[in-house]
Image (tube, grey):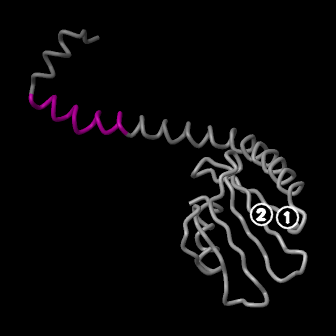
Amino acid sequence: MINLYEFIKLFYDKKFRIIFLVIFVPIIILSIYWLTIFQTNQHKETRLPKLQSQCDAQSKIIFEKIQSKNIVVIYNYKNYFNDYLGKCYILLHGEGAGATGTSDKLLDANTEEEIATCESHTTAPEIDFCRFNGGKSYYSINNFNNFIKIYLENK
């Protein structure tokens, strides 16, 4: 068995250092990397269902709060937990009483912050009032749909 003193003495030998660096260092680095990836994936599998159920519950609370405040617009909703971003989002879809348009909103389900909103009108389909992150510029419904995909997909 080699003791620490002999190991340090060996390390001064140039051939030993090269062998050590070429063989053992990559093995150590790959082992650490593999363990990190393995534990991260294992952790995701156990926590993801819990986070999704928390997202479901939080979204239901927000939906009921918004629904109780609105008389004219009747909303329905879908919630999404984005594992990549680590956040829960709620997409509200509403139709006005006169059925002349629709309203869509994407909210952060934890902060209730509005991320994007879009008002489109069936009587004037070329007029869409879609905004992102509270901005003052308006965009089309297609731009709105492309924008919200970032939040609703795990990429």
**Which residue range is magenta in the image?**
14-29
Cα separation between marks 1 and 2? 6 Å
Q: Is residue 76 left or right of residue 139?
A: right
Return the residue at label 1.
76
- For the residue labelled by badge 2, is the local secondary structure a helix, a strand or a loop? strand
Give the quadrant of residue 40: top right
Residue 107, given in percent of the width and then of the height, sits at 69, 56
What count of labels does the image hold? 2
Residue 137, given in percent of the width and then of the height, sits at 54, 73
Q: Earlier in the sequence, mark 1 or mark 2?
A: 1
**Which residue corresponds to the image point at 86% horizontal and 68% vertical from the top-left?**
73
Q: Is residue 61 left or right of residue 44?
A: right
Residue 43, given in percent of the width and then of the height, sits at 62, 38
**Relative to 31, residue 89 above or below:** below
Residue 92: which numbered mark, if any?
2
Q: Amino acid at mark 2?
A: Leu
Q: Is residue 64 left or right of residue 120?
A: right
- For the residue labelled by badge 1, is the local secondary structure a helix, a strand or a loop? strand
Label pair 1/2, CB-CB below 8 angstroms: yes
Q: Is residue 22 left or right of residue 113?
A: left
Which part of the image, by quadrant, shows the C terminus?
bottom right
**Relative to 138, residue 39 above or below:** above
- Does the stretch in magenta take in 121? no
